[in-house]
Amino acid sequence: MNNQLIPVSELSSAALCPVRAFFNRSNPFTEPAEYTICKQISSHLGSPVDKAVVWDEICTIAPGTDPSYQSYCESCIDACASREWRVASGNDFFVKSDRFGICGTIDRVYTESPYFSVTRSVKPPTSGIYPSDRIRVLGYALCLSEMSGKEVNGASVDYIPGGISRYCEIQPRDMRRFYSARQVLMNMNAGGVPKKPLIAPCEFCPYRERCDPGPTRLSDLL
Ligand code: SF4
């Protein structure tokens, strides 16, 4: 295996669309304001959240944040106020797995199971967990399990704008998708260019203008 560790966030992108993961590599990451806001709110969960304090912190972390995002920030805090949250023992915890060749930063960790949670800056799906979030949970669980020696079978996914936290229990299908996404990225590390999948979430993709608009040929898959 190539010694280059693959970020868990890349696995999640590749599971969504391999071509999107390819484009991401040539585009510098700019943190969206929604993400900055949800991350900062999540660091306060489990304690009373003061809207003014959180907004001040956000403006310090990202000084160019448009003031119009303050109402978004407040609506997220209101949404989160409707449930109890656990107090994290740590935030932004770096993890890696030499066995699986992956690494990443876990948003929140806890001393009791479930041992970590992932912060998301989107509303939750109608039910369950988004497939790309399941890959995130699996990747971090593999790392944390290897580093701590504990059995890590799942984690919470905190959908901050919806004020909802859902438990994601790792399933065999997640492991299969993980291997498939990791292979895509290992091929890219070796200089390969991924093909467009048969079904891709193009409607909301930032690269749809640059991407081949035609459908994937069935023959490409055979
Ligand atoms: S437009 Fe569609 S196929 Fe192209 S990168 Fe985006 S999601 Fe993938």
Image (cartoon, grey):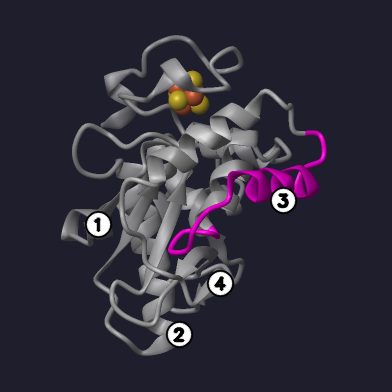
**In the image, residue 43 lies at what x, y percent?**
55, 60
Residue identified by numbered label 4: 93
Which residue occupies 27% across, 82% down?
A: 151
Observer-side mark, 3 or 2, equals 3
Q: Secondary structure at mark 3?
A: helix
Q: Tell me the kind of residue under disc 3.
A: Glu
The answer to whether residue 160 shows anywhere in this view is yes
Viewer-proximal residue among 43 and 99:
43
Is tag 4's residue or tag 2's residue first in the polypeptide sequence? Answer: 4
Indicate the amino acid at tag 2: Met
Residue 192 percent coordinates (x, y): 56, 43
Residue 193 visible to an observer of this rendering:
no
Q: Cβ–Cβ below 8 Å for labels 4 and 1?
A: no
Real-space Cα distance between discs 4 and 2?
12 Å
Residue picked out by circle 3: 57
Highlighted range, magenta: 43-64
Q: Is residue 67 above or below residue 6?
A: above
Q: Residues within 10 Å of mark 4 (few under 14, many from 20)?
A: few
Q: Is residue 109 left or right of residue 92?
A: left
Secondary element under disc 1, as helix, strand or loop, is: strand
